[in-house]
Amino acid sequence: GPRALILADLTNRFYTMVPHSIPLGVPLPVLDNEHLIEQKVDLVQSLMDLEVSYSVVSAPSSNGAADPVRVHYDKLRCGLSVLDRSSFEFQLIEE
């Protein structure tokens, strides 16, 4: 019926915008239930997170002489500090 045609059209639009790799001859599932749609929403959110991370990491650095790893953490506004060898966190990581 009309609902199936609308779902097929919307599904095709989604797969056009977010290509998927599948074996030849295997049809992509129609996004016609909540579970599949939630999976695709999670996928799109992950792709958006990757895009943001990539844009932050690939932005030009203001300090070309700094350690590249430190520069990436600074761009992500993440602090780095050395753990004391006797700290609980250090012991946990070492295990």
Image (cartoon, rainbow, N blue to C red):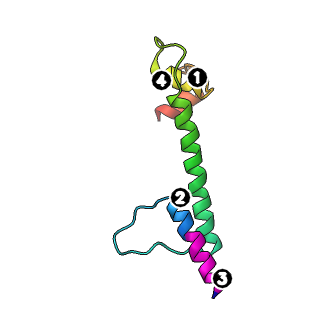
Mark 2 and mark 4: Cα distance apart in space: 33 Å
Q: Which amino acid is tagged 1?
A: Asp
Front position in the image: 88 or 60: 60
Q: Are marks 3 and 1 in contact (CB under 8 Å)?
A: no
* Residue pointed to by mark 2: 17
| Residue stretch rendered in magenta on the structure | 2-11
Left or right, 42 with respect to 19, comes to right
Q: Nearer the viewer, mark 4 or mark 3?
A: 3
Front position in the image: 93 or 1: 1
* Residue pointed to by mark 1: 74
Q: Which mark is residue 3?
A: 3
Front position in the image: 21 or 10: 10
Which residue sits at x=35%, y=68%?
A: 23
Q: Is residue 10 magenta?
A: yes
Left or right, 94 with respect to 5, comes to left
Which residue sits at x=56%, y=56%?
A: 43
* Residue pointed to by mark 4: 69
Mark 2 and mark 3: Cα distance apart in space: 21 Å
Counting from the top left corner in percent of width and height, residue 72 is at 52, 26
- Disc 3, SS: helix
